[in-house]
Image (cartoon, grey):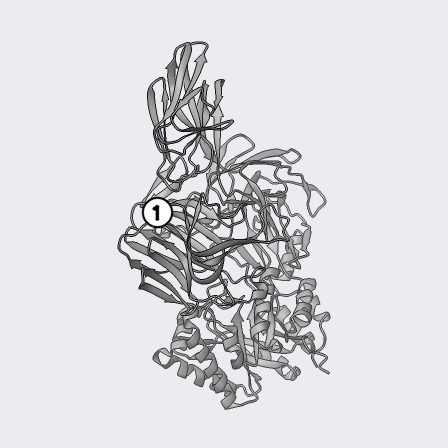
Amino acid sequence: MDLLKGKRNMVWAYMGNTRMYEVLRDYGDRLNTVGIFTFEVDSTGTLSETGTSIATMMTYINRWPHVRWLLTIMNHGTASIFTALRNNEGGAKTKFLSEIVRIMQKYPWCAGVDIDLERGGGYENKDSANALFRDIYSTVKNYNPAKLVNICLPGMTGVEGSVGGENWCVYADLNPYCDTAAIMSYGMSWAGSAPGPVSPRSWLEGVYNYAVAVMAPDKVFMGLPGYGWNWRIHDTPENMGVTYRGTSNTYYAAQFWLNGSYNFTNDGQPQPFIPIIAYWDDVDMVPWAMPHVYDFMDGWTMAESARGALTRETYNRRRYLTCYGKEQNSVFGTIYVDRNGVPDSYSGIVTVTENMAVLGEGGEATYNFTVSQSGTYDVAVRLCYPFWDRNALGVSLDGSTKMFQESRLWWPYWRKICWLSLSSGVYLSAGSHTIRISGGVPGVQFYGFRVCSSFSESTWPGEAVYTLAPRQFIDVNGNPAQPDRGFKITFEMLRRKPDSALIWYEDFRDSPPLPSTYWRTLSGSWAVWQDPESTANRPYSQLEGSGQLAWQYEGFADVHLRAQIAFPSNGSGRAGVFVGNIFACLNIDTQRVELYQGSTLLGSYATSFSRTPDAVIRSNPSMYTIEMRKRGNRVRVYSGASNTLRFTATVSGAGGFAGIRSDGPIKCQLLRLGDAWTYEPYERFDVVYPDGSGASFGRIARTGVTWDEEFQVFTVTSDVDESATRSEEISLDYEFFHSKLLPLQCGHDYRVRIRPRDINVWTVRLLLGDADGFSILYYSDADSLIYWANEAAYRWKLRGFALWSLGQEDMRLWEALPRQI
């Protein structure tokens, strides 16, 4: 019986600090495998001893012969070195393999080597990377079959599932080329990221659910962090004179912050020294704290009010406010006449309901009204364009006609009732007047009008109000403490990359599904499945079928189409999106992204995707994204969760119907139609401070675009991707925006308003802290590490855990671990 099954460990001797040597001296009996972080490889394949001195390790090597002492070889994350080794540039791999033998000969006591090569690039490099690790393994075993090879692998949640771009790594391919593998599942949060656990549960679960499915579990060490990060969030990194806001903290440095031994004014005056309570995250199983934060609230539960289109959402336990569409905010002064759409008289073909009128061919409707006294008035009409081909209506006031017409497919008021200005500041005499609707395109819905003292309208996502309540702390000497200069509010937000201005978003959750008013089956058969057990108002749904399904409109030309598609177990052939005779698709048979015009293949990109078993097609389908952007005679084809451009192609003029198309059975959970040239940004929000002053944040400067200020969208002026219009990156991570210095006083409450200007901006958290500095601190302690070590052993049946790195951890850990002798 192996009493240590699942309980082995690996550590790296890297830090060179006192605690590292204390553990080696006092707790060597608790160590199983140690990587001595000494050997650096260069682009020629030559190894040099630049890290931990072997001489300083010999006492412990001799003291603990049971430990597997491995010689760690690293490239320090230099991509060019990995590339040179992988491709044997100038014989670099050949030299490298001989160097591995050389150092094993030089240090014959070693148990083998530990290979730590990082930044190997994308999936296209997997074959050459596999060959490199195969050759390393065979070289070591040919030298001495008893020598071991440990490989350090990036955290992957699937094939091409790296969060750091290390998609060269395919666990199943590398499994034969190692005796053990330490998966470096630490670093989800880092110096340049938003604050959070270094190894959050969601990531660890994704990594090890995948790893044990494709690798021998008893080879695998779960990588865990002995360290944490303290992210300064009171200002921008450039203003603080640093590259990243995060500073690495050992467990004991974290304790200094919690005990009030450190502050943000160089550990001296004027910022007080304040002991800070730590919180325990009972999902990610890590401690965390907020040094010098006097009040905070999340965007979701702590908003005093949230008006407009703002909705409360949760993602990975982050509770935030956002909105998915803007509302029209119509403001009226004194209203003198308020009429619905029922006319006083009409002629021709007119459909009248209890509150609206719809003109048919040749129809006309008349409305009479009076004003009691002469003067200038605003007149607003209320109407709805039901579809893209029912888009014009003439409205006259006392014989002066204005044509209300909309040709922009992305216009946000399609199928919505909206107020529009008929006349502003018009003089009306006391007495009777007439409004008449006529002409235009049959089918526009007229809901009436208002005569008022003033009218204005705009689109807005809404407004959230928060009340912040700073209170004094007690410093290390027991005295009340507060900021020396004042406070700053940091707004934790999430921005997103712009997307095409929305024309239609279809997730098939509405009822009834696929109404014939809007949809047409051009071929095949289509239906919508909805989760019968869901109690949600809009349950999860899937479009299923084959053939061609299109919107009921033949006027499409330049559009952006996106679909999320799954191939069931009997799926075959091509599936994707089309406009006219242009078809961008995923081909399950050829394992390619493809573009056709008619029967002509115009371009392709090799990738991989799979069918979903019937048992999980509803609950956990493998959805793949395919999209195309057609502009004139140029088409861009994208795929993948990151909407990656795969190739471009030239087409001949095409237009007509647009929608989804498939040769065989598919499932689809999203079909999105957007404008080819116009984008909607997801980035800006405005703030109103307690003193009534305001500020705007998040808007990105762009070139080569024209702005529509009414709807806050922009249109590219040449055929480029949106990313070419800006130099600023959008991180897709939580970001921090900082207020001006606020002279607030502890003991009082203060109201702050957040007003998004764009949709899809997340208001995650507001933090009120000392203007001299405040932070968010995450770290690991013995409880955290033991919890995850047990998960490695008992949940995933792994070999054990690998700790980066010795000397950073809570040393109480070693008292809780079994002896390895």
Q: Is residue 346 left or right of residue 193?
A: left
Q: Amino acid at mark 1?
A: Phe
Q: Which residue is mark 1?
A: 556
Q: Position of residue 496 (x, y in %)?
A: 47, 49
Q: Position of residue 250 (x, y in %)?
A: 61, 62
Q: How many marks?
A: 1
Residue at the extreme left of the image, as rendered: 652
Q: Is residue 577 above or below residue 270?
A: below
Could one spot residue 408 in this view of the protein? yes
Could one spot residue 811 in this view of the protein? no
Q: Is residue 385 above or below residue 813?
A: above
Quadrant of residue 743 in the image?
top right
Q: Residues within 10 Å of mark 1 (few under 14, many from 20)?
A: some
Q: Position of residue 413 (x, y in %)?
A: 44, 36
Q: Position of residue 335 (x, y in %)?
A: 49, 19
Quadrant of residue 644 in the image?
bottom left
Q: Is residue 667 left or right of residue 251?
A: left
Element at badge 1?
loop
User: Which residue does the image show at 62% across and 59% down from the upper left?
Assistant: 779
User: Which residue does the image show at 64% across and 71% down from the upper left?
Assistant: 796
Question: Quarter of the image containing the C terminus?
Answer: bottom right
Residue at the extreme front of the image, as rendered: 348
Question: Quarter of the image containing the N terminus?
Answer: bottom right
